[in-house]
Amino acid sequence: MSHPCVRPILPRDIEPLQTAAAADGHQLVYPTHILTRDNAVIGYFSIKPPYVNVWLHTKAIRARDTVFLLGILDALVAQSGSADYIMLCAPDSPFVPYLSKLGFTHDYTAKLVVKKLYHPEPPQ
């Protein structure tokens, strides 16, 4: 099995990414990078410093992959000029017991909310 690949997302990636995430019980939250292995979608990063969102496929990612991918995430965020980031993590995520070992601190409980802005066409 090869290493995961991380690259900026392209318009053609949205549909297969959305399908894979939905099949794994997740949805897309502004993905910026697609994660693949052997041409199969295994996750995404949404990097909008200081906020980061990550989806890693629950059946296609191993613990070693997680450490590898979070290292890439750290490098991408640092490259953007940020010294730290905020990452959402669901309370039932399998990563919760390992967050401190992975270097995360400040466990806050919050509800993720999204507000879609719709701007109708201006009146004529």
Image (spheres, rainbow, N blue to C red):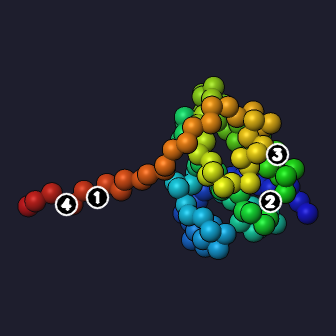
Residue 98's quadrant in the figure? Answer: top right
Please identify the residue farthest to the left as the structure is shown.
124
| Residue beneath disc 3 | 68
- In the picture, measured across the screen, residue 113 lies left or right of residue 124, that is right
| Residue beneath disc 1 | 118
Q: Quadrant of the C terminus?
A: bottom left
Distance of label 3 from label 1 (alpha carbons) = 38 Å
User: Could you tell me which residue is drawn at 55 percent across and 34 percent down?
Assistant: 50
Q: Amino acid at mark 3?
A: Phe
Q: Earlier in the sequence, mark 4 or mark 3?
A: 3
Residue 56 percent location from the top left of the image: 71, 57
Residue 7 percent location from the top left of the image: 68, 52
Distance of label 4 from label 2 (alpha carbons) = 44 Å
User: Could you tell me which residue is drawn at 58 percent across and 68 percent down?
Assistant: 18
Q: Is residue 103 above or below residue 124?
A: above
| Residue beneath disc 4 | 121
